[in-house]
Image (tube, rainbow, N blue to C red):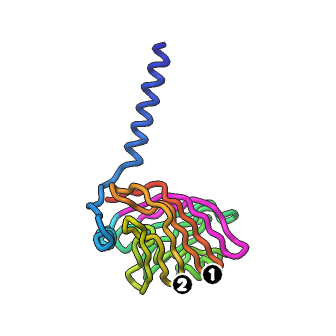
Amino acid sequence: MLSRVLNLGFLMLIVGLAGCVSSGGSLLPQIDDWETRKAVLGDTDEWEFAGRIGVSAGEEGFNGKLWWRQDGIVFRARISGPLGVGTIFINGDRSELTLTDKDGVVTELVDAEAELRERYGWTIPVSSLPYWTLGIPDPSTASEASFDEAGRLSRLLQRNWQVTISQYADGGGQSMPRRLTALNNDIKVRLVIDNWTFR
């Protein structure tokens, strides 16, 4: 009996600790409307998310994991799971990007989206993804947006990509995108964000 009680207590401790890890970070300011969302999230400099990604491009594609860390204009992304590719890292900002492949070889990228497609047969919208995953347009170029009943971004046309956010969930105490799909010709990127951390 004592053993069962101790085991139950240990299990509750582990669950409690896991909850603390998954809900770490700071809370976002209150977001009540679209203009506030754009302003608050557009000014948020330090955040990260972890999730699952699926990409198809013609006959190529994969399902894997995506981790993204944003520090101001600089980001670090880790993509793991592509068959034959292993884990790759993309780091940099809009002007300077590097790709580190599974063997640790570092390559400077001039056009990340085009060069990923050329190298691996698939690509992701590297430059705009940090904005779209926050549920706001990339401010560097024109866009057409549609909204759901709660005033959150639901569809976006930008840079020849059609973005759909089909589900929101809590992140930093506010409603953040959980399921996102981006289409561009034969390229389809599906993203499920499992957790957000804001600093």
Q: Which residues are magenta?
A: 47-69
Compared to residue 60, the image places residue 10 above or below, namely above
Q: Position of residue 190 (x, y in %)?
A: 57, 66
Residue nearest the viewer, comparing 94 with 152: 152
Crowd tier of the residue under label 1, counting other residues whose Cα lies within 10 Å: few below 14, some 14–19, many 20 or above: few
Residue at horizontal 51%, vertical 58%? 51
Left or right of residue 148, residue 174 in this image: left
Q: Residue furthest left?
A: 29
Image-quadrant location for residue 177: bottom left
Q: Secondary structure at mark 2?
A: loop
Q: Position of residue 157 (x, y in %)?
A: 49, 80
Residue nearest the viewer, comparing 102 with 17: 17
Q: Is residue 14 magenta?
A: no
Left or right of residue 161, residue 24 in this image: left
Residue at horizontal 60%, vertical 60%? 64
Amino acid at pointer 1: Asn
Amino acid at pointer 2: Asn
Q: Is residue 61 magenta?
A: yes
Q: Residues at badges 2 and 1 in contact (C-beta under 8 Å)?
A: yes
Crowd tier of the residue under label 2, counting other residues whose Cα lies within 10 Å: few below 14, some 14–19, many 20 or above: few
Residue at horizontal 30%, vertical 55%? 26
Q: Main secondary structure of the magenta part?
A: strand
Image-quadrant location for residue 100: bottom right
Split into 4 quadrants, where in the image is the C terminus? bottom left
| Residue bearing the label numbered 2 | 160
